[in-house]
């Protein structure tokens, strides 16, 4: 598995050069941090996040020691308003000490000067996925503690697949054929859902196909969202939508959840963390779901990464050292992982490779008929494509794509239009920031 993550290092490392001009405006190191319990009283830090099991993890940490007290506030998921809330708090000077940030959004926050560069405790980096470390290391500095990786996976209703005589697809051609068969068997049923509000799911598909949207060449950002890989994915999903072979619903919306409950949607193209989402959303369907590798173009294992989270210290935190200690406990200790996954709602795939057996042990796989889903996640993680890097204007890119994808259902835009609009908006934003851009 380490070979796969190491291959991706070159792409991320190249991005460091261009990001270096951005990180100059980032927060300073930990020299102004308070040592926990230095005056005999516990240090109190604030933490904002939204991932399943976070409150239980905070409670476990507070119960385990007396030096640091963590006050937790649950905020909306990043793309659903959480990132806007964090950005506004940073601008207002009242941000929490620690925040959850997904890998795709980390460069954006770094470029805005919203975060403080940190130092990981001795030995921690060695136990983390090299790729996760690289994604949190920009401009030669460390900006977050990696928590989980998020390889893609396909969740499906095994009872309904059997009822309709549908084979679990191994290729995307198989997936389309299976989608046609599902619709023919039940006019109201669809194999999966296209999420118009979630560009990251589409981006994971492009990543899996071998696309490289962002690439740093010296001090210039090369932006390319019209390569052959992206065009292939765009055309594929446009075809599924045009032929009404997938639903078009907002992710995690009442409509999406309802369609899962009534069997109108019998599959979910998600990531490793999706196992906990389904288990928590549809407890009454225990034993009916299974997990398979995400389909690939040639039938060989291949994956992108859909999300994946980190813990970052905001620039004005006066307790960075304590915040890093807490973040490290959550991400790299058996107690932290047990607390998160033991909540029963999280299927996090730890970036700390040595803790995956713990995750497997704690997660109750009975919902999936006892299937070893962590073995599948391991294989998916090993197949993540190299060559993908995130750009420094992810908010602009994704907001623009999201706005245009929302028009697809009404016929006012195509998936290709949305990707092109995201490209143009990103180029314009980077130029506005004074960065060199090609594409």
Image (tube, rainbow, N blue to C red):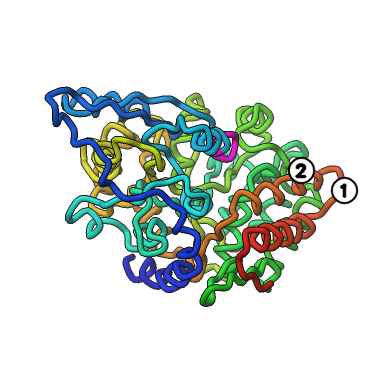
Q: Nearer the viewer, residue 309 or 186?
A: 309
Along the horizontal axis of the image, is 85 left or right of 366?
right
Does any portion of residue 374 appear in the rendered image?
A: no
Along the horizontal axis of the image, is 44 left or right of 271?
left
* Percent x, y of residue 129: 32, 59
User: Which residue appears at 25% of the width and 51% of the height?
Assistant: 120
Secondary structure, magenta segment, majority class: helix
* Percent x, y of residue 236: 72, 61
Q: Nearer the viewer, residue 15 or 305?
A: 15
Q: Quick one: label 1, few (<14), some, or many (20+) residues within 10 Å?
A: few
User: Which residue appears at 44% of the width and 58% of the height?
Assistant: 24
Q: Is residue 365 magenta?
A: no
Along the horizontal axis of the image, is 63 left or right of 430?
left
Q: Quadrant of the C terminus?
A: bottom right
* Percent x, y of residue 332: 25, 45
Q: CA distance from mark 2 to mark 1?
A: 9 Å
Above or below, 346 against 298 in this view is above
Does any portion of residue 420 appear in the rendered image?
A: yes
Quickly name the residue at label 2: 406
Above or below, 187 against 271 in this view is above
Above or below, 329 against 47 in this view is below
| Helix, strand or loop at mark 1 | loop
| Helix, strand or loop at mark 2 | loop
Q: Earlier in the sequence, mark 2 or mark 1?
A: 2
Query: Number of marks in the image?
Result: 2
Which of the numbered marks, if any, corresponds to residue 412? Answer: 1
- In magenta, the rendered stretch is 77-83
Residue 190: quadrant of the picture: top right
Q: Nearer the viewer, residue 44 or 346?
A: 44
User: Which residue appears at 35% of the width and 51% of the height?
Assistant: 117
Q: Quick one: label 2, few (<14), some, or many (20+) residues within 10 Å?
A: many
Q: Quadrant of the N terminus?
A: bottom left
């Amino acid at each position: 598995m380490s070979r796969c993550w190491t291959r991706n290092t070159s792409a991320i490392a190249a991005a460091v050069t261009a990001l270096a001009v951005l990180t100059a405006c980032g927060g300073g190191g930990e020299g102004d941090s308070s040592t926990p319990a230095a005056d005999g009283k516990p240090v109190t830090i604030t933490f904002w996040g939204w991932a399943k099991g976070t409150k239980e993890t905070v409670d476990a940490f507070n119960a385990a020691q007396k030096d640091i007290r963590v006050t937790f506030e649950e905020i909306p998921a990043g793309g659903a308003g959480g990132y806007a809330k964090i950005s506004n708090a940073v601008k207002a000077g009242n941000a929490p000490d620690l925040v959850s940030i997904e890998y795709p959004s980390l460069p954006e926050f770094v470029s805005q000067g919203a975060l403080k560069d940190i130092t990981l405790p001795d030995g921690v980096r060695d136990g983390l996925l090299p790729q996760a470390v690289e994604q949190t290391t920009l401009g030669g500095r460390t900006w977050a503690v990696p928590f989980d990786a998020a390889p893609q996976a396909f969740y499906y209703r095994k009872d309904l697949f059997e009822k309709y005589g549908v084979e679990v697809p191994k290729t995307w051609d198989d997936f389309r054929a299976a989608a046609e068969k599902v619709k023919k068997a039940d006019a109201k049923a669809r194999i999966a859902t296209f999420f118009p509000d979630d560009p990251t799911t589409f981006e994971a598909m492009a990543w899996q196909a071998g696309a490289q949207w962002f690439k740093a060449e010296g001090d210039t950002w090369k932006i390319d969202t019209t390569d052959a890989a992206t065009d292939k994915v765009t055309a594929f999903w446009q075809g599924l939508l045009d032929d009404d072979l997938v639903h078009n619903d907002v992710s995690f919306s009442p409509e999406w959840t309802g369609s899962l409950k009534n069997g109108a949607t019998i599959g979910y193209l998600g990531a490793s963390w999706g196992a906990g989402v389904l288990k928590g959303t549809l407890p009454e369907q225990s034993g009916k779901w299974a997990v398979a590798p995400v389909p690939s173009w040639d039938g060989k294992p291949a994956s992108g990464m859909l999300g994946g989270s980190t813990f970052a210290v905001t620039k004005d935190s006066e307790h960075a050292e304590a915040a890093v200690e807490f973040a490290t406990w959550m991400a790299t200790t058996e107690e932290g992982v047990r607390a998160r996954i033991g909540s029963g709602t999280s299927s996090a795939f730890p970036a700390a490779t040595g803790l995956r057996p713990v995750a497997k042990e704690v997660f109750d796989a009975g919902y999936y008929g006892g299937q070893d889903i962590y073995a599948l996640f391991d294989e998916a993680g090993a197949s993540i494509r190299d060559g993908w890097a995130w750009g420094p204007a992810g908010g602009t890119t994704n907001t623009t794509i999201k706005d245009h994808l929302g028009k697809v259902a009404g016929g006012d835009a195509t998936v290709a239009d949305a990707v092109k609009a995201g490209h143009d908006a990103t180029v314009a934003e980077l130029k506005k920031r004074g960065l060199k851009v090609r594409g």
